[in-house]
Amino acid sequence: MAKKARQAQVKRPPVVPQSACRGIVWPAIPSPLNRLVLSIFHQIDRSQWLSATALAALQLAQLRVLVAYAQDAVPFYRERLAFLKAEAKTISMETWSKIPLLTRVDIQDAGQELLSRKFPQRHGDVADVWSTGSTGKPVQTKGTTVTTLFLSALTLRNHLWHGRDLEGTSASIRLTNEAKLKETAEGKFESWVPAYGTGRALYQSIRLPVREQIDWLHRMKPDYLVTYPTNLAALMAASSKPPPGLRQVSTMGEALDPALPDQCRDTWGVEIKDIYSAQETGMMAAQCPSGSSYHIQSEAVLVEILDAAGNPCTPGEIGRVVVTDLHNFATPLIGYDIGDYAEAGEPCACGRGLPVIRRIWGRGRNMLRLPSGDVIWPLFFTREAEKAGGIRQMQLVQKSLTQLHLRVVSNKPLTAAAEGKIRKDLINRLGHPFDLTVERVDEIPRDRKSTRLNSSHVSESRMPS
């Protein structure tokens, strides 16, 4: 019996980091980039248990470096932060609260002026980052190798928080580039966990009709599914039969309806674990392994929940989310009013010092129904539309199965040619010849049904006027 017990213990070795050195499996010798990911991970694996006070002190130290750098190297911030003078290097949280909030309109208007002129060479390569436009106001920023490294380390921590089997298969249905779709179709699979070898990583486009998504999931039989909450709801509505072998669903990109986790348990028999993220800022918060509240990822971002007067919300209060990416020196986003609302939470019983968000309100999307009966997730704001008419914001309203109405906010009146280009591009992207009308408006406010406060009710400064 003892011999059999020993055999059972060594039958399946623990998953170890991926080794880049030929002939070495364990202990692994990771690639240079993965060594950096693992280095950050081992630090944040410990820092999560620091007190809230200790974490805030470390954030402030990083914030001082970022603000001083932006004041010196980014044209947009030279005037905006001029009132700090030399105090940028020793900024206090009291002074920090006087810095005006950065809005999406600010980012759109600033353009190249928001980019660094003295980019730190050791931060690596620079890449364009586009927000998805879920608020109707997409923004373009730039990220670096450093921001990617932090996102990878946070992603690794999130997987381990939730006890995922790294040898399992992950299927992702989201905004996905064609290269990933092609790799999946050709049977080429990359790892879905940073720095580790894993089971298959599968990708499918969110634009695929829901019924076809269901069929794909039943063929692929993934252990884990990654998608948007509204898409998950549509999948369960289309089929009460879960994909074979599904263990857990990870949601992101939208506000999670409080009823959806119970619905997922009752319908598909699996748990949902949600993350709060944005293209331009990366992962901002992730659900605690011990409960439904979210832990702010303090090692990478400073997240503030502010009331209408610009004061920090107390637990139970709902306020707007203001985020500062602590490590993006290519496009510093300092005090960025991302457009979401969240409810501040009490310190978590799990013992982590990471601040708590009880609930996130905002960025929910509606599905579009086709005349065929298929349901799709509509991605309709495009760079082509922005270029054609100076579009700042768009809202698509489905009047019937055949009729759509598009409201746009633009810098200038739409010419017939611009409107035609927008119409053609949108119809092509939706994949159906809808009867589409276009209306230019001055503003598209968010109502409470979309879980955001009307923007006219929100001050654009931290401090009361």
Image: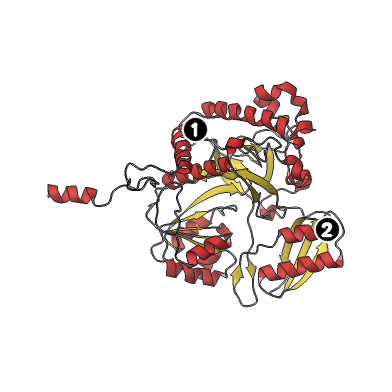
- Between residue 301 and residue 179, name the one nearer to us: 179
Q: Residue 356, percent across and down?
A: 54, 38
- Visible residue check, residue 422: yes
Task: Name the secondary structure under disc 2.
Answer: loop
> Residue 270's quadrant in the figure?
bottom left
Q: Which of the marked residues, 2 or 1, is nearer the chain's N terminus?
A: 1
Q: Which mark is residue 441?
A: 2
Is residue 308 shown above or below 203?
above
Say whether residue 207 is left or right of residue 401: left
From the top left corner, tell me how far across and down residue 81 is, in percent.
75, 30
- Residue depicted at x 36% and y 43%: 28
What's the residue at 74%, 25% (across, down)? 84
Pointer 1: what residue?
353
Circle 1 sits in a helix, a strand or a loop, which is it? loop
The residues tagged by marks 2 and 1 sit, at their Cα atoms, a distance apart of 45 Å
Give, as a three-letter code, the residue at label 1: Gly
The answer to whether residue 243 is left or right of residue 404 is left
View extreme (front): residue = 22
Q: Is residue 370 above or below residue 422?
A: below
Q: Nearer the viewer, residue 278 or 43?
A: 43
Residue 282: x and y in percent read 58, 45
